[in-house]
Structure formats: structure tokens, C-alpha cells
Image (tube, rainbow, N blue to C red):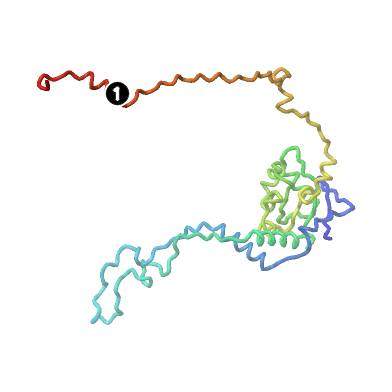
Amino acid sequence: MIEAPLYSAAGAKSKTPFALPTDMFDGTVHQPVLHEAVKVYLNNQRQGTQKAKTRAEVSGGNQKPWKQKGTGRARQGTTRAPHWRGGGVAFAPVPRDYRTGIPKKVRQLARKSALNARAADGLLVVVERLAFETPKTKQMTALLGKLGFEGRKVLVLTHGINSAAYLSARNLPRAGVLPYTEASAYDILWADALVVEQGALGGEAAVEAAEPKVKKAKTSATTARPKAARAKPATAKKKAAPKVKAPKVKAPKAGARRSTARKAEPKKKGSE
């Protein structure tokens, strides 16, 4: 089990050290993974906007400077070749994307290795909650001096977002503040020493016990409504309307239609 010195927010050292969680601090430091993570981080910071003109993009050089033979000089085809003054650049850089990826488990292993490396060297310190009333650079400078990190590059890892601590260290060129969950392997290796809040390392129980708990009244949608609104009126069952059968109309037979049609026709005189 790896232990780290425990300090109060005022800089007073505790007699009992803080036992670091074993799931994150097991003493393993993987150097190749650390190198890969740092290389990927630096590659992703590059903008990739560098550009130079090749011999095809430089203006001019449309004709031979002199004839091929008879001058005693070396043969030349253009004055915009890379070995000419004002010519193009051989293998000129062009805008490109330098972004590279890294597996999630490799990134997590690199972060774990960086934390173990700082803890093994005794450069990791645990402090209680940095509850600054107002952001003051003087308070942060005094705390780092009491911890023995004055003049070093220090990274303060807070339990969640701590705006007061961030604003207190913003004017210090060799100090930085980040949430513990957002610190990468490069951020941890950049700093010479780490100052981690107790709550970020699993000390939430001790921090919550020290703070008074305030019970909040439970409010819900049902309790906020009056009883009259909650009571549902009794609904009578709707009776189905009686079905009205339409009267059936019988169609006349085919024979009857023919007979009536014949009777209606007038008789012709020539037929008699």
C-alpha cells in the first residue's frame, strides 16, 4: 500500500499519512505507454498549417535561361529549380492533420503510470478541501510554500470544479489547477509535484462527515396539488346507443322491368 502525506487546507501536516487507493496506485510504471501517450498528446496540439511552394507553384521560370549547348555552362531548364535563388522548395511541407489516436485502455494505463511515478518519488501530497472564501493568489502561494513546493512546477488536482482554487493559481506561471478526472498523463508529467484533494482519492466519506447535512423537504407533484384536484370524479359508464336497422328495400325483378318497358313504348302505325 502506497501512502502520501496528508495536509490540512491551511498547510498543517497530519500525523497519520493518507493511504492511496490500491486500484489506482499499485506501483506499476509502464514507460513505453507513457512515451506513447506523451507523443500522441503533442501531435494533437499541432495545427498543421505549415506551407511552402514547390517548383510548380513558384511564378516564373517558363523558359530556359540559356541554350543547351555551346555556352560552357551547365545545362539548365528553368530558373525556379530548388538549387536556384528564388526557386521552389524540394519536398515542401503542405497543410496536413497530425492528429493521432490512442486506445482508451492505453490512455488510462498511461495516466495510472504517471500517478504512480509521482507517488513513488514522494512528489504527491494529499490536502483537504481547498475551500477558499475568495480567490487570492497570496493564499495559494502560502499553501505551496508550506508544502515545500515553492519554485517548482505544481499541479493541483481538485475534487470536481473548484473555481476559487483555479482563480487563485491563475497568475502563478509555475502552477496549474485541474479537476482530478480531467488530468491527462502529459499534465501529470509536466508538473514536478502533485497536490491532490482528499475527496478526489476516495475520501468523500470523511469530507461529508465534517460538513453539516441539511435535510431538504420532499416535494412532489402529488403533494403540491390540493386534495380536491387529486380526487378524480366518478365517471358514469356511457351506454351504447341503440342500433337502428335500416329498412330493406326489395329490388324489382328483372322480368317485371322488361314488361313495364314494353308497355311504355308507343305502337307504330306501320306494324298493324
- Residue farthest left in this picture: 270
* Image quadrant where one finds the C terminus: top left
Q: Is residue 269 left or right of residue 113?
A: left
- Residue 256: give x, y in percent of width and height: 31, 23
Q: Is residue 192 left or right of residue 79?
A: right
Amino acid type indicated by mark 1: Arg
The residue nearer to you, when weighing 202 against 154, is 202
- Residue farthest right in this picture: 15
- Residue 243: give x, y in percent of width and height: 53, 20
- Residue 91: give x, y in percent of width and height: 43, 69
Q: Residue at x 12, y 22 (%)?
A: 271
Q: Residue at x 69, y 57 (%)?
A: 188
Q: Residue at x 80, y 52 (%)?
A: 126
* Image quadrant where one finds the N terminus: bottom right
- Residue 206: give x, y in percent of width and height: 84, 45
Q: Residue at x 27, y 20 (%)?
A: 260
Q: What residue is disc 1 on?
A: 257
In this rendering, the answer to whether 270 lies above or below 122 is above
